[in-house]
Image (cartoon, rainbow, N blue to C red):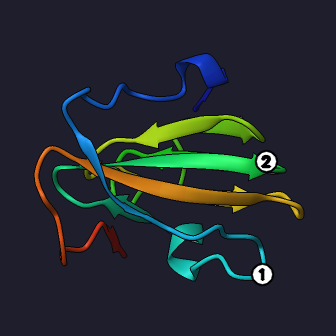
Amino acid sequence: MSHQAITNSHQRIPSSWTIQRSTPFFTKENVPTALLSHHNTAAGVFGQLCVMEGVVTYFGFADSEATDHEVKVVIPAGSFATSPSEYWHRIELSDDAQFNINFWSATDKSGEKMFNSK
């Protein structure tokens, strides 16, 4: 298991990619349960998790069956982290967390799923 500092917590999204979809702001009260358990971003899609308030902790896994995380990233308010295409992960929220997710892709993904849950 590793703990990455926020400065090393994300892979760079290619500059030619564009945001295909953005979620509304989520809190502990309305976060989709799929985000709290193993899920991954769809093929050809990067997720950008942007924290507005509180803290969101991102746990990355080697595959869909892994129970021990290989990556742990603590994302404080005012920061973001990215999740690469098809990488299994889940999140935890502080009580006061507020965040949203932008989904980036090189191609138009209108009407397509942006993530897959287990």
- The percent coordinates of residue 80 (x first, y second) are 59, 37
What's the distance in space between the residues labelled 2 and 1, CA to CA? 15 Å
Residue at the location (36% across, 25% down)?
A: 12
- The percent coordinates of residue 21 (x first, y second) are 35, 63
Looking at the rendered structure, the kind of residue marked 1 is Glu
Name the residue tied to disc 2: 55
From the viewer's side, name the closer residue of 62 and 17: 17
Secondary element at tag 1: loop
Vertically, is 70 above or below 114? above
- The percent coordinates of residue 17 (x first, y second) are 22, 38
**102 with respect to 63 (left or right):** right
Vertically, is 14 above or below 20? above
Residue at the location (50% across, 68% down)?
A: 23
- First reached walking from the N terminus: tag 2 or tag 1: 1
**Label placed on residue 42:** none
Whether residue 56 is visible to the viewer of this picture, yes or no, is: no
